[in-house]
Amino acid sequence: MNKAGGIAIGGGGGVGSGPTTSAAAAAAQKQKALMVRVETDIANIVDNFTHLVNAARINDTPVRNSQEACTMDMRASRMAQAADSLLKLVSELKQTAIFSGFASLNDHVDQRIGEFTQLAEKTDSLLARVGEEAAASLKELETHYYSSAQRTTQTLEP
């Protein structure tokens, strides 16, 4: 497990430094460390499996067989430890993917909320304008209706 101390990549001041730069540098460093862990664990599994198969040969001497049995137990436990380490790594990667997914999802939701708010404001102004135009048209039609000659003759006839 590569746990190096010291200064992070891009952690200094100057042009291009800031929260995003340092976060990107930390993410790159974490990715490197995770890749080293994966490669180490897989190499351990393969190496221990190879030694386990080599030690599984049957010999005639009983002392040698007990030594090989002990070696096989040791190699099998090392394989189990490496496999457990890989499982922990996978769990860590899943958690990282989930939590980083939530952050990007929240950003996307905030962006969509902004877009829909702008669309709602445009729709409200459009509806207000249509309502004003409808009211003005209705008023104009009422004026024409009440001042028309046909209406005045219809009201005088009965």
Image (cartoon, helix red, strand yellow):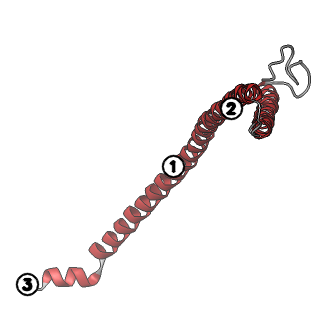
The residue carrying mark 3 is 158
Q: Amino acid at mark 2?
A: Ala
Q: Residue at x 44, y 55 (%)?
A: 128
> Gap between marks 1 and 3, in whole Å?
52 Å
Q: Amino acid at mark 1?
A: Glu
Name the spot of residue 140 as percent of width and height, x first. Answer: 37, 69
Which label's residue is closer to the chain start, 1 or 3? 1
- The total number of labels drawn is 3
Mark 1 near mark 2, Cβ–Cβ under 8 Å?
no
In what quadrant of the picture does the N terminus appear?
top right
Q: Which mark is residue 76?
A: 2
Q: Residue at x 70, y 29 (%)?
A: 69
Q: CA distance from mark 1 to mark 2?
A: 67 Å
Q: Nearer the viewer, residue 134 or 37?
A: 37
* Pair 1/3: label in front: 1
> Looking at the image, do the residues carrying marks 1 and 3 touch, with CB atoms under 8 Å apart?
no
Label 3: which secondary element: loop
Where in the figure is residue 145, as x and y percent of width and height?
29, 75
Give the residue furthest to the left: 158
Of tags 1 and 2, which is closer to the observer?
2
| Residue 28 falls left or right of residue 66 | right
Q: Residue 121 bears which disc, if any?
A: 1
58 vs 130, left or right, is right
